[in-house]
Image (cartoon, helix red, strand yellow):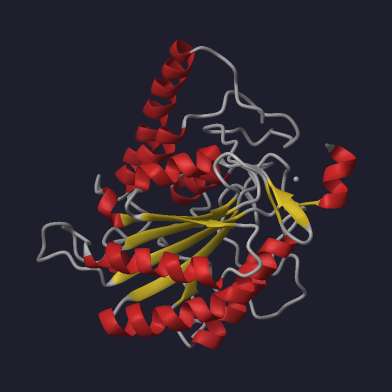
Amino acid sequence: MRSLQWGLALALVASACGDDQGDTASAGGDSETEASAGESASDSATESAGDSDSGGDASQGGDSAGQGEARCDKVDLLFVIDDSGSMEEEQDKLTAAFPDFMITADAELIKDKGVDYRVGVISVDMVGPSGQNLRGRLQHAADRLACDDVPPGRWIEAGPLGDVATQFKCVASMAGGAGLEMPLEALRASLTDRVHDAEAYNAGFLRDDALLVVMLITDEDDQSVLNVGEDWDGLVSPGPITPVPVYWDLLVKLKGGDPGKLVLIALSGAEAETCSSVDGVADPAPRVHELLELAAPNSHWGLICDDDYAAPLRAALDVIQASCDGFGD
């Protein structure tokens, strides 16, 4: 969250991991202009999604569609975390609640349903060329914290819960991101661009036969611009904000056209009101809420200003379980 002082001054798992080969302003305009922009952006995003092989090869993707009855035995959990300067408090609350979230998930989902899971972390920062903590590249190194318990690979694989929680805390504590947050564009880049570029850094994380769970954590609304260039300085919006349905359609296409294989969770501001906590405030997040509405009933929202994230993460797990129960229906 924007710290109150900053806001006043400026106007706010065993740690076996995937191996190295796996491993704003809103643009103004009338409805006609917005529709045209939406169609153009949708075409671009659809083409990008169509080129994706979901980031996995035969050994990672599991059974192809149509071979036997679909069941929820894999979950790919991707955290999209705001790394702007106002987010330290919220990241700390997230990493504090994560161990209990994993303990409950282990008892009620992983062991009970035999689910194999993995956890990835990316920032919302789309400034500059692709690199650690940038443009959707999976985070696997210490950033804000001086910690050594980083995943040896590019994401966190299922394992002893203490190891999973420790690694998550290390990589999910980030800083230095741009003030114009683009969580949806970072998500798109993570699942497409960072899979198919020369480095192919994120290749293998997303499995064709897995339930994809995306958790957005941000104290400001999404300000994504589709295909933002590497020369963007992060200070002024690089173009018209891309309609939310463009990103939703992309996610659905990445999961074979089945929205039932997607879960969207968000900890953000309310849809239309500002909220505050001890150290800061969070802006309204109508675009985040629009995405959750598109994903309903496989979605859940929690208020980022809450003092403790245990309850919203518990509720999010209920949605994940329900989605897993209905997987492939």
Check the image and report above or below for 317 versus 84: below
Q: Where residue 26 appears, x then y in whole percent?
A: 61, 26
Check the image and report above or below for 283 versus 44: below
Q: Where residue 263 appears, x then y in whole percent?
A: 37, 56
Q: Nearer the viewer, residue 274 or 84?
A: 274
Q: Where residue 159 appears, x then y in whole percent?
A: 45, 84
Q: Where residue 17 appears, x then y in whole percent?
A: 49, 75
Position of residue 139 in the picture relative to residue 232 (left or right): left
Q: Residue at 87% of width from left, 43% of height from top?
A: 8
The quarter of the picture where residue 240 lies is: top right
Q: Nearer the viewer, residue 110 or 126?
A: 110
How many labels were placed on the picture? Answer: 0
Q: Residue at 64% of width from left, 53% of height from top?
A: 82
Residue 186 visible (yes or no): yes
Q: Residue at 61% of width from left, 33% of height from top?
A: 229
The quarter of the picture where residue 299 lies is: bottom left
